[in-house]
Image (cartoon, rainbow, N blue to C red):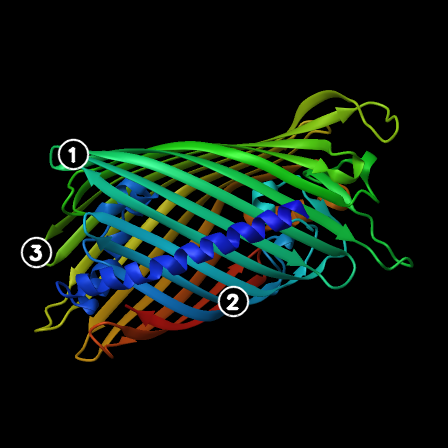
Amino acid sequence: MKHDTSTTSLTALLATAMLMAAPATLTAQQNDSSHTSLSARMWQTQMPSADFGAALYLNPAMQSYRYSASINRLQAGMDYSKASRPARLEDGTGSSTGYGCIDAYLHKGKATLWGNAAYRNGTTRNVRFSETTDYQLLYPYLMADTVGGNTHGEYYHFMGGFSYPLGRWNIAAEGEYTARMEFRTRDPRPKNLSGNLMARVGVSTQVGTGVMGMAVSARRYKQTNEVKLYNEVSMPTIYHLTGMGNDYYRFRGANTSTYYQGHSLGGMLSYRQRRDSQRGAFAQAGYEFTEIEKIISSLNQLPLATLRLHRQDATAGWLSTVGRHTLGLRLSEEWQRRQGFEHIFGTAQDNIYPQIAIAEMYRLTTLRIGADALWQHALPIACRRGYWALQAGTAYCDYHEEYAEPYRQLRVRSWQSALTLTAAVESRHMLTRLQATASRTWHTDARADHIEGTMATPVMHAYETLAHPAWSTGAAIETSYKASPRFHPFVRADWRYSRYALTAHGMGLTLAAGIYF
């Protein structure tokens, strides 16, 4: 219960801080609107070229150079998805979610402020082989069973940051907190609460006409993960998974009260060729290390396993405008290694298990190398604005998962390609934006060795998704009405469809309404 109380207190504190900051947001927006119209600010921040170098702005010391004008958005909506066969069994066959969020980016005097607050509430249907929240982060050390069911959840997210110039230097800080609560009202009944707290500080300096920055980050993670069983007639076995169909056999069954705790440390370097424009060259590189421990609280805080994650990424690109044309080229690379260390225990005495060894048993390595190109063209519309943009990308992906004893492995190499067409036009009273997307995945090599057993089902299910060609498509439309110089209401619809694993398919629909101000 201590974790529940601290999470609630921090959530209330962050919510209060954002409410106190709201008057400053409105004041800055009003000051900014005296120089640039709201529709012009929306136009500037929504063009595909505006976020072509988005990786740079993970560094808070680079945020003041992101947009030259302030922009804020408040919205609420619903999201629905369903699949004939989920890409991963842990994801479920679909979800129904309602959400609300507010985003702010503003210049106030010399300072730049930005932030985000979001809330989601919904149900994920037919979740199987995972009773643990944030399974993508904690995999393979999940608590699981073969029954599963519909999971209800709430999601809270708060983020805020500032940047301030000191001569040729710029100092910045950013904080972020995410909390999730998930539960089920029928056996097996997980009751999970997770908290993820992050802090990042950065500094940048002027280098000729450009700017160079660096930042360091720290993160703290915790989750309580408990499963209750009330039906004494039919009680499923609870497994503590260790990867690729294996589980910790010794602790199967009644040990259903666990928690996770961990931390992350990271750093990044950023460079932009021009301070006053997004045109020119840009580059970013970062690294983060995460360590998370899984503990069975019902066995005197027994440390069952340790997960270590290494993540390294880099991006370099160039953006240029010639007449009405904007051209861009971007290269990116991301490497991740996930290592699982199992703790080995001796004979228990008084329910206390002495640890006698630790061994690295699980390893997952992924690599993605990609290239993207952008062509954006401004339309010659008298007294109004319009553009269309075409963005194409391709990437090579390598997925290699291994378990030491008994030896098991998955290896999939694939190529991905994507195409996005965006068009927007401004009329006297409206601003409309359309987008269409398409993507395709081909595998060049796929193999699975020695994957067997009851808990190997989700592993082979995911392999079937990875090892076969897939394609997806989508379309979105957003229309805003110029109701006032200070606010524009909008509506948006986003539809998507995918085909994978030979015959499986899924679709999704998002509807939202809100205001820009």
Q: How many marks?
A: 3
Residue 32, image quadrant:
bottom left
Residue 185 drawn at (x, y percent): 74, 64
Q: Are marks 3 and 1 in contact (CB under 8 Å)?
A: no
Residue 510 visible in the displayed image? no
Q: Please give left or right for residue 192 compared with residue 37 in the image.
A: right
Residue 507 image label: 2
Q: Are marks 2 and 1 in contact (CB under 8 Å)?
A: no
For label 3, the SS is loop
First of labels 2, 1 by sequence position: 1
Residue 296, image quadrant:
top right
Q: CA distance from mark 3 to mark 2?
A: 40 Å
For label 2, the SS is strand
| Residue 332, above or below 70 | above
Q: Amino acid at mark 3?
A: Gly
Disc 2 versus disc 1: nearer the observer: 1
Residue 168 image label: 1
Residue 96 drawn at (x, y percent): 57, 68
